[in-house]
Amino acid sequence: MKKYILNLGILMLVLWATSCTTDGENDEMANLAQLQADVEEITNTATSDTWTITNFVDSGKNETANFNGYGFTFNEDGSLVAENGNTTVTGTWSVTIDDDSSDDSNDDSSNDNIEDDCNGCTVDQLTEVLTGCSDWSVEKLERGNNNDLEDDFVGYDFNFSADGTVTVTSGSNSYSGTWEASGSGNNIQVVLSIADLTDIPDTWTLHEIELYNGESNVDLRINGEDRLRFRNGCTLGNFNEGQSSGEIDFNIFFASPADFAELSEDWNIVSYSANKIELIHESGGDGGTDLLTFEK
């Protein structure tokens, strides 16, 4: 089984402009709300109690016995704890929407040398995200050998408008500028022009869009070295209604021991109920199929 570094935030999502939308575009937005509602429901189900592994098949080999006696607790803070009374193993978990089912890249957002993860991104998606939330903050800023430049922008709020203007406020100070995006997929160029701010104005490449319940992120790069990551606490879409008609990932990561590291995957959900969660992962390399079932 391939080992993946979990990105509590691996995610690309199809969002379309709401003005002058076609019926197909309206369907996309409705499906977004449906998927997001399922994310919340699955998350609530997972955090409701302690679970046991009743089936784990790794590339055709049944390894369920490796987890006999362990109870798995999916905590709301994203930690995953397995205990058997004597041993405690800690990992992480999340439930995310995966727009690209063929993308199983081990994208670690803390690594500047990874490939772009925005194959299906569009300018419309980026515009919807940036203008759909107010008061974006700089979560990460790296230029050349200067890391942690985000500390210089603590308390700065960035507001993007659909007309191409951007306003930045910090206390009683206000800065005005423009932004423009063009291209598609991994070649979307984002030009930020804010004369009175240093390090941020430049032509950036869109690396990734991540949307979660209660968190939205836009990650920009330059030549895989410079990085600008905007973060917002807003939730895009409706998390309170709808049914799923797309792919949702159940992400699990354990660094060690080896038996638990085998569980580290961006699993697809086969089915879930109050007492059972069935997961599947089809490897892109060797074509093997892995199965994982939690029950309580």
Image (cartoon, helix red, strand yellow):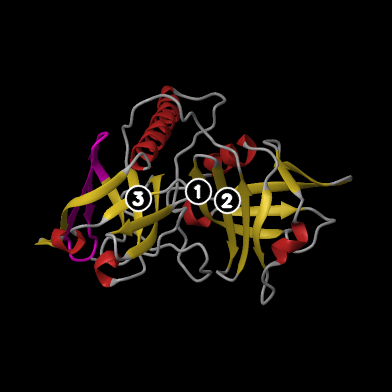
Q: Relative to the observer, which residue lies in front, 240 or 286?
A: 240
Q: Which residue is mark 2?
A: 218
Of all residues, the one furthest to the right in this rendering is 172
Residue contact between numbered discs 1 and 3, judged by CB atoms under 8 Å: no
Q: Which residues are magenta?
A: 269-296
Say left or right for 247 vs 148. Answer: left
Comparing marks 1 and 3, which lies closer to the viewer?
A: 3
Residue at figure coordinates x 57%, y 25% from the top left: 19
Q: Relative to the observer, which residue lies in front, 104 or 264?
A: 264
Instruction: Give the image location of residue 121, x and y in percent.
Output: 48, 47
Quarter of the figure with residue 6: bottom left
Q: Which residue is mark 1?
A: 210
Say left or right for 64 vs 248. Answer: left
Instruction: Give the image location of residue 1, x and y in percent.
Output: 23, 66
Q: Amino acid at mark 2?
A: Val
The local secondary structure at tag 1 comes to strand
Q: Label 2 vs label 3: CA separation?
A: 30 Å
Residue at figure coordinates x 50%, y 44% from the top left: 211
Q: Relative to the observer, which residue lies in front, 175 or 204?
A: 175
The local secondary structure at tag 2 comes to strand
Q: Which residue is mark 3?
A: 73
Q: Amino acid at mark 3?
A: Thr
The local secondary structure at tag 3 comes to strand
- Crowd class of label 1 (few under 14; some 14 to 19; many from 20; radius 10 Å): many
Residue at figure coordinates x 56%, y 49% from the top left: 217
